[in-house]
Image (cartoon, rainbow, N blue to C red):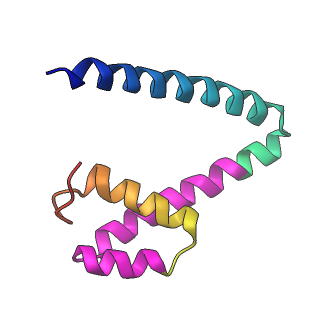
Amino acid sequence: MPDEPQDELITHAINMLTEKISKNLLKDFLKLPKELQMNLVLIKAAQLLLANILCHVATNKEELDKISNEQGIEIKDLIFNCAFTGFASKFELNK
């Protein structure tokens, strides 16, 4: 199929950009004071835990949509990432 090589090139480009951005973000993160680093890690862990719990609690996609719409954009994104990666069959989502 002629689209496969182009898709692979796009995937490779995305992966390269993601790697470079991740390295720069890590460098910036490591420049922060240790206490602030720990606080950020704890906040993010709590957000991920909340997203996972909300995916467990919601009984269907409509309920998950309603719950996520009541959250801030950052938590909403985490909820949908969680739903797609760990609960795709529960919410009948296409990966």
- In the image, residue 42 sits, relative to residue 74, either above or below, namely above
Q: Is residue 63 magenta?
A: yes
Most foreground residue, 43 or 85: 85
Residue 47 lies in quadrant? bottom right
Residue 45 seen anywhere in this rendered image of the structure: yes
Number of numbered markers: 0
Left or right of residue 85, residue 37 in this image: right
On the image, the x and y values in percent for residue 85 come to 30, 49
- Which residue is depicted at the point 47% across and 58% down? 78
Q: Quadrant of the N terminus?
A: top left
Residue 49 seen anywhere in this rendered image of the structure: no
Q: Is residue 61 magenta?
A: yes
Left or right of residue 83, residue 76 in this image: right
- In the image, residue 33 sits, relative to residue 9, either above or below, namely below
The boundaries of the magenta stretch are: 40-69
Most foreground residue, 94 or 41: 94
Left or right of residue 37, residue 42 in this image: left
Left or right of residue 20, residue 71 in this image: left
- Which residue is depicted at the point 47% across and 28% down? 14
Most foreground residue, 21 or 53: 21
